[in-house]
Image (cartoon, rainbow, N blue to C red):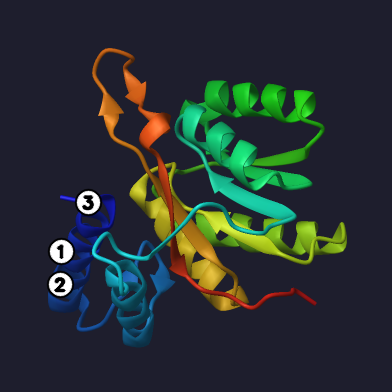
Amino acid sequence: MSWSDMFWEYLDHVATILDILVGGIALWGVFLPTSFWNRMRKYLRGNVHQGGEEVDTIAADGVIFTVSKKETPIWTMMKVRPNRVHLIGSRQTMEAVNSIKEFAHTANITISEAELNDADDVAEARQLVSHAINQLQQHGCKRIVIDVTGGKTPMSIGAFQAGDEANLPVIYVTAPFDQKLRHADLDRARIYVIREGRENTP
């Protein structure tokens, strides 16, 4: 089962349970209209069998990452080569955040970060990503991309929603797990665009 299938299956279960309980869709205090879930289904199912358009790289001068491990964001930064990066982490992922920051400094990428108080809070994740978008825009970024690969599922949901509201591209990276290396096999990593966005931010 692909990452997008598992992600959507999880969201489907959550939406069904909440529909039964409250007669609408609300998630961790965030009101998510039915149209949002329909867009999520469309973007994650996409027109490619893996759930989105596969690309070799994507043009971006600013990238926002939800973080769990260090390897995939570093790989993505090497592929995309943005000018600025903003990391959304949690207390549990600060070691990975610090490793990504070290790489960014060696690659002359300007980096900023924000720490979630609760990695299970969709509303907080959405708020931090929205704030990060504004920050990158203020620093002159014209093509901002949101990578929702890392972090817990609520973080990815919040990040996706912020990207959807701002009409920005959203991507995720798939890479099979290497049992020997104990991390993703990035030689076989692929970037998928699960939400198209406008070319330029204001």
First in sequence, mark 3 or 2: give its number: 3
Q: Residue at x 68, y 62 (%)?
A: 144
Q: Residue at x 78, y 66 (%)?
A: 142
Compared to residue 125, the image places residue 92 above or below, namely above
Q: Quick check: can you spot residue 109?
A: yes
What amino acid is labelled 3 in the image? Ser
Q: Are marks 2 and 1 in contact (CB under 8 Å)?
A: yes
First in sequence, mark 3 or 1: give its number: 3
Q: Nearer the viewer, residue 30 or 108?
A: 108
| Image position of 133 (left or right of 1) | right
Q: Position of residue 22 (x, y in %)?
A: 21, 78
The residue sitting at the right extreme is 139
- Mark 3 → mark 1, Cα distance in angstroms: 17 Å
**SS under mark 1:** helix
**SS under mark 2:** helix
| Residue hosting label 2 | 16
Which one is closest to the eye, mark 3 or mark 1? 3
Q: Residue at x 42, y 31 (%)?
A: 186
| Residue hosting label 3 | 2
Q: Position of residue 202 (x, y in %)?
A: 80, 77
Name the quadrant containing residue 31: bottom left
| Residue hosting label 1 | 13
What amino acid is labelled 1 in the image? His
Q: Position of residue 32 (x, y in %)?
A: 38, 77
